[in-house]
Image (cartoon, helix red, strand yellow):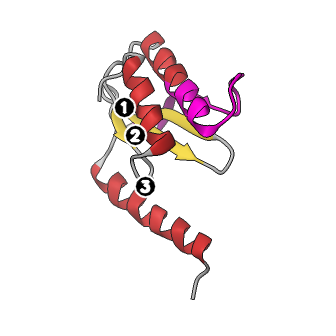
Amino acid sequence: MLDKSKEKRINREKRHRRIRAKVSGTKKCPRLSVFRSNYYIYAQIIDDENGNTLAYSSSKDLKIKEKGKIAAANAVGKDIAKKAVEKKISNVVFDRGGYIYTGAIKIVADSARKGGLIF
């Protein structure tokens, strides 16, 4: 029998594989991928056809004044949207990484939409 943390990780990885079977990024419509660790949140825009990361943002690199995951997620969403708009990327496909679409994942998506990304 697996312990709870290992079981949760395995279930998330299964969900992520299932999502990735359906979601793929192209040059015109890249994939916005989100990863959440215990401490930080990461987002990157990926062109899967060429295997390139077009833009990247993480709460580890940003100077965030407020504490908490929600503030970090909001800052990452705004930053990734700003970087995407600078590179003339407006349409993306959202890849939630197997996480449930609540909390920090939803905040990243909402703040990226407010920043100018369409998905």
Which residue appears at 57% of the width and 25% of the height? 75
Which mark identifies residue 30?
A: 1
As measured in the structure, the alpha-carbon distance from the residue carrying label 1 to the one carrying label 2 is: 7 Å
Question: Would you say residue 72 sits in the magenta stretch?
Answer: yes
Does the image show residue 46? no
User: What residue range appears in magenta?
Assistant: 50-77
Separation of residues labelled 2 and 3 (CA atoms)? 18 Å
Residue 79 percent coordinates (x, y): 54, 21
Q: Secondary structure at mark 1?
A: loop
Query: Which label sits in the foreground, 2 or 3?
Result: 3
Q: Is residue 5 above or below residue 19?
A: below
Callout 2: SS: loop
Compared with 107, 10 (above or below) is below
* Place of residue 40 in the rendered image (x, y in percent of width and height, measured from the top left): 65, 41
- Mark 3 vs mark 1: give the one in front: 3
Q: Amino acid at mark 1?
A: Pro
Rendered-image quadrant of the N terminus: bottom right
Residue holding disc 2? 48
The residue beneath circle 3 is: 98
Q: Quadrant of residue 116?
A: top left
Q: Do tag 1 and tag 2 residues touch (Cβ < 8 Å)? A: yes
Q: Amino acid at mark 3?
A: Gly
Whole-Å distance between the Cαs marked 3 and 1?
18 Å
SS state under label 3:
loop
State whether residue 49 is above or below residue 80.
below
Q: Quadrant of the C terminus?
A: top left
Between discs 2 and 3, the one toward the N terminus: 2
Residue type at mark 2: give it.
Asp
